Image (spheres, rainbow, N blue to C red):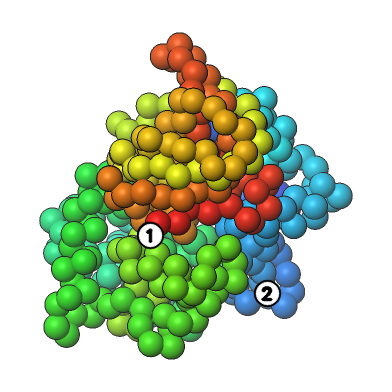
Amino acid sequence: MKGFKDRDFIRTGEDFFFCVIGYAHPPDRVISYLKYTPSPGGKWGKGATRFKRVLPYYTASLLLETFQVLEKQYPQYLFDSPVLGIRMLAVPLAHIKTYYDPVEKLRQLFKAVRVDPLQARLVEFVQLLSGESGIPETFFGVTGSLLIDIHQPKFSDMDVTISSGENSRKLRETLLSLYETPKSPISRLEGRALRRRCKMMSDLYPISMKMARKIYERKWNIGRYRGTGFSIHPIKSDEELVEKYGDRLFTPKGMVKVRAVVSDVTESSFLPATYGVAHALIVEGPKVAGLREVTTYEGLYGGIAEVGEEILVRGKLEGVEDKRKQEKYYRVLVGSLEGAGADYVKFT
C-alpha cells in the first residue's frame, strides 16, 4: 500500500470511516479524524446500510466532542504523540479494513458503464477542469462521500483533489477565469447561499460575518457546478513529500496572539497549511524570538493570505526542533485542542 495522504479515507472493522489528515504518520498508525459511523437513521448510504456524519465540520471544538465519545468506547483510536506533543486521533494499521484512494476511485468512475447522476456530474466537472487547465485527468481525485460510495445525489457535494502545488496554482487561475466567464457552468456562491455560508463560518469560528465574507472571496476552491456544490483540495505529490513523522519535534509553550508579515505561501494551500512569517510581534503570551511559521489544521484559514500581508493570529505557541537541519525555532499552531475553538488567522 502506498503512503497515506491527506483526504484519503480508511474504514475500520466497526465500519467507521476516517478521513486522513496530512502526510507524516507514525509507523503503525494513520493520523485522521472520524467522519462517518453506522446509524439506522443516517442520511448517507444505500438501502439498509446507513451512516451519519460524526463531524459536520473539521473544527477543534467539534473534534474535542469526538475525543470524549471515543475515550469511553473506542480508546484504541486515541494516540498520545511524543512527536507532536498532543493527544490525537490515529487509527492503528491493524484496525484498517479498507483503504480508499481518491485518484483510483475517480479513474474507476471514468471507466464505469453505469453511474448515478452525481457521479456523472463529477466526471463531467473534472473533464471540464482538465480541459480548461491543461492538467491531465490523472492528477485529479475524488474524496468525501463520493469516494466511499455513501453519497446522496440529491444533496451531496463534489469534493475533488488535485495533486501538486504547481497543478493547484494552474487550477486556481483556471477557476478564477471561469468564475468571470459569462454563461460558465462554474460559479461562486452568491445571494442566500453565500449568506448562509458566511453565517455558518461566523458561528463555527471566532470571526465576524464581514471577515467570513472576506475569507470566502479569497477562496478560489469553493463554488458550484451546474447547481451542485464543489470544493477543490490541493494534495502534495510524492515528490513534494519531504518530511517524515519524527523529523521535527514540537513542544507546547502556551497560547499567544501574534502580528506578523507573511513571507512564504508555498505550503499554505495544503493541509496542514503553513505560512512562513517574518517581523513577528507577540502581543499576548510568552515572548520569544525566532518565530518563523504559522500552521493551521483549520482548512478555512488555508490559502487566504498573500506574501507581504500582515496577519493577526491567535494560537498555540510551539517550540520546533528540526532534527534534519539541527536547528530550533518557534511556530504558532491554529486549530489545536488547547485553542478550544478561539484561535484564528485574520487579515486587514
Q: Residues within 10 Å of mark 1 (few under 14, many from 20)?
A: few
In front: mark 2 or mark 1? 1
Q: Is residue 127 above or below residue 297?
A: below
Identify whether 192 is placed above or below 27. Answer: below
Q: Report whether residue 94 is seen.
A: no
Residue closest to the eye, 264 or 117: 264
At a point 41% along the width and 72% down the height, the residue shown is 213
* Image x and y of residue 65, in percent: 74, 57
Residue at image position (57%, 31%) is 287
- The residue closer to the viewer here, 323 or 343, is 343
- Residue 311, horizontal then vertical, whole percent: 41, 50
Residue 134 seen = yes
Q: Quadrant of the C terminus?
A: bottom left
Mark 2 and mark 1: span between their CA atoms? 41 Å
Q: Is residue 156 left or right of residue 34?
A: left
Q: Is residue 44 left or right of residue 220?
A: right
Disc 2 marks a residue whose amino acid type is Gly
Give residue 336's quadrant in the image.
Answer: top right
Depth check: 322 or 160 in front? 322
Q: Which residue is mark 1?
A: 348
Q: Residues within 10 Å of mark 2 (few under 14, many from 20)?
A: some
Which is nearer the N-term, disc 2 or disc 1? 2
- Relative to 96, say whether 49 is above or below: below
The three-letter code of the residue at mark 1 reads: Thr
Which residue corresponds to mark 2? 42
Q: Secondary structure at mark 1?
A: loop
